[in-house]
Amino acid sequence: MSGRRRGLLLVAALLAGFALVVPLALALDRPREEASATAMVGGPAPPLAGTTLDGGHADLAELRGSVVLVNVWASWCAPCREEMPLLVETAGQWGPQGLRLVGIDVNDDDAAAREFLAGVGGTSFPSIVDADGRLAVEWGTTGVPETFVVDRDGTVVARRVGAVSAAWLAEEVLPLLEEA
């Protein structure tokens, strides 16, 4: 094989490799929010039931008829620590309109999680212990925090990957509460 032909083959191979690597790199560089924020939206909420941090039992099915925020969190997660006071405040403020909050505490130390919730007033809602992360996987989470909005009929209507904001909550939750 001539040197020129080998050079052309090398250039062709490099271009082919480049064509494969660039889209992959762009996809990996995309923020977690963009990559999965719409996954599950429009479908039925997965089952969610289990033992809570306070030793009780919670079941999302029992909240049918309410708008539910399902928040996946952990006490060791800095963004979770930042958003939890807002979630607690929102649940308290909009609770009379039919909003409920349910937590999924993932891969956490139960004592640390209880202490954290007590410190932010988060003992007013059930938080299901998910020591092995199985529930979080069933909900399709890619990390913590993630928040899902479940409408009164049990359909996931919104998903936030990363910490929620007051503006996001107002945009995604208030219209559902006003429908009642």
Image (spheres, grey):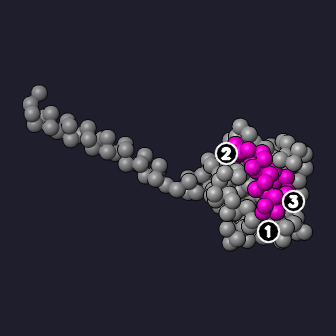
Marks 3, 2: nearer the viewer? 3
Disc 2, SS: loop
Q: Mark 3 points at which residue?
A: 124
Q: Name the residue under label 2.
A: 140
76 magenta-colored: no
**Amino acid carrying mark 1 in the image:** Glu
Identified at 37% across, 48% down, the residue is: 22
Q: Which of 85 and 44 is in front in this view?
A: 85
Screen quadrant of the C terminus: bottom right
Tell me where the magenta segment starts and ends, as one range: 101-127
Disc 1, SS: helix
CA separation in Å, label 1 and label 3: 11 Å
Q: In which quarter of the image is residue 174?
A: bottom right
Instruction: Answer whether labels 1 and 3 touch (C-beta < 8 Å).
Output: no
Q: Position of residue 177 (x, y in %)?
A: 83, 68
Q: Which of marks 3 and 2 is nearer the N terminus?
A: 3
Q: Nearer the viewer, residue 109 or 150?
A: 109
Disc 3, SS: helix
Give neighbour class at mark 3: few <14, some 14-19, many 20+ (Cα, 10 Å): few
Instruction: Answer whether labels 1 and 2 touch (C-beta < 8 Å).
Output: no
Q: Name the residue under label 1.
A: 89
**Amino acid carrying mark 3 in the image:** Ser
Q: Which of 40 and 168 is in front in this view?
A: 168
